[in-house]
Image: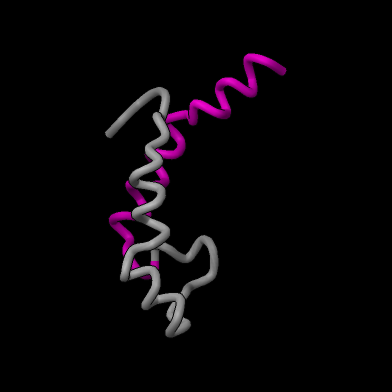
Amino acid sequence: MRFGIRMPSWRKSLAARVSWRRIIRHNLGFKMPMGWGWVSNPRKALYNRIFNRTSISLVVLLRKLFK
């Protein structure tokens, strides 16, 4: 588990948007509403919830510094 600043990765961001799993899921209409990730994969949902609460985005940090 990472604590602190999250470093953006353009490669991972692009890979997530053009993955074959995402394309199939969106074309067939097998999407769940926002916030329902715990139904499809509870372990991943719990990990993501903890990760997002214990780390901060670099963009958010810069926005707070220059506000």
**Residue at the image position 47 percent from the left and 75 percent from the top:** 31
Q: Position of residue 66 (x, y in %)?
A: 67, 15
- Depth order, front residue of 36/29: 29
Q: Pick out the residue farthest to the right.
A: 67
Q: Pick out the residue farthest to the top.
A: 65
Numbered disc total: 0
Q: Give the range drawn in magenta.
A: 39-67
Q: In this view, does 6 lie to the left or right of 41?
A: right
**Residue at the image position 33 percent from the left and 64 percent from the top:** 19
**Residue at the image position 57 percent from the left and 28 percent from the top:** 60
Q: Position of residue 28 (x, y in %)?
A: 43, 85
Q: Pick out the residue farthest to the bottom.
A: 28
Q: Quadrant of the N terminus?
A: top left
How has the structure been colored for display? one colour
| Residue 8 on the magenta segment | no
Q: Position of residue 13 (x, y in %)?
A: 40, 48
